[in-house]
Image: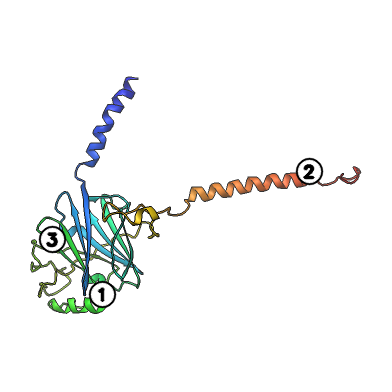
Amino acid sequence: MNCWFALLLALPAAVNAKAVGVNPLTGVDFTTSADRMELTVRAEQPIAPDQISAQAEGNVLMLRVDGVQTTRRWLATPDDLVKRTLLHPSRQHAPAAVIRMRLNAPVSAAVVENIRVRAADDGALIAAIPRDARVAARWAAVDAPVAAQPAPNAVKLNIGVDKAPAAAIEVPAALAAASTSVGGIPEALAAPASISGEDAPLEAPAPEAVDQPLIAGLGEAGPEGPSLAAVLASLLFLSVVGFIMWRKMRTARPTGGNGPLI
């Protein structure tokens, strides 16, 4: 009894210790203009630009923000280019939040490479996404010319900014020249890094979740499909039922000398 009592007393302390260092996400705002879509990510503590990375898979653009905590919710992103957007915690990189935007067309590598990130005065992080490859090419032309690099599947938005759009950026050692921001365009991408598309594909939002307010009104996504255990259990159940039916049919057959079944 004393052991159980001590365990119950230690449980809250363990939970609090696990939560130390986690930065809860407080809001995600979406704005759109003629050449870009912008996501403003806010948390209780300021978010550094090197905490965000991007990856595209087909029509899905994923932005991962490391070091923050969130729940699975739908995000209102009213734009003709966007079908729906899901905000959810990352299972493989926790604590981290993943913003999955399903677009109406495939996301080009040029768009991912030219996402601009800047820090706001209030500590929020603003990611500016070019609307198409043509806009991305124009943004890239603003920067100083650099050696051509193959487009990676995942891009780390590791940008040194000082709360101003015109701050200098950090360029990987493989690139020969530094780049700067001109004409109000936020900072450019830098070193590539890998993020995983480990989380469930986007599903249609539940009816009760769609009409809720912005970040607090992101609806919980639907089921993600049967697990392996459920499939194996179903196969076992069908096998048992089939065996029982086979035994019944076997015993119902007539045997030699007993005459026909009545």
**Residue beneath the point at 71% across and 46% down:** 245
**Residue beneath the point at 8% across and 68% down:** 168
Q: Earlier in the sequence, mark 2 or mark 1?
A: 1
Q: Residues within 10 Å of mark 1 (few under 14, many from 20)?
A: some
**Residue beneath the point at 64% across and 45% down:** 240
Q: Which residue does the numbered mark 1 point to in the structure image?
A: 110
Disc 3 versus disc 2: nearer the observer: 3
Q: Quadrant of residue 9?
A: top left
The C terminus, quarter of image: top right
Q: What's under tag 2, amino acid-wise? A: Thr
Front-most of 132 and 234? 132
Q: Position of residue 224 (x, y in %)?
A: 43, 54
Q: Is residue 213 visible?
A: yes
**Which numbered dot is residue 251?**
2
Q: Position of residue 260 (x, y in %)?
A: 89, 46
Q: What's under tag 1, amino acid-wise? A: Ala
Front-most of 59 and 8? 59
Q: CA distance from mark 2 to mark 1?
A: 70 Å
**Which numbered dot is residue 56?**
none
Judged from the image, the secondary structure of the residue bearing numbered disc 1 is helix
Q: What's under tag 3, amino acid-wise? A: Ala
The N terminus, quarter of image: top left
Disc 3 versus disc 1: nearer the observer: 3
Q: Are marks 2 and 1 in contact (CB under 8 Å)?
A: no
Q: Earlier in the sequence, mark 3 or mark 1?
A: 1
Q: CA distance from mark 3 to mark 2?
A: 77 Å
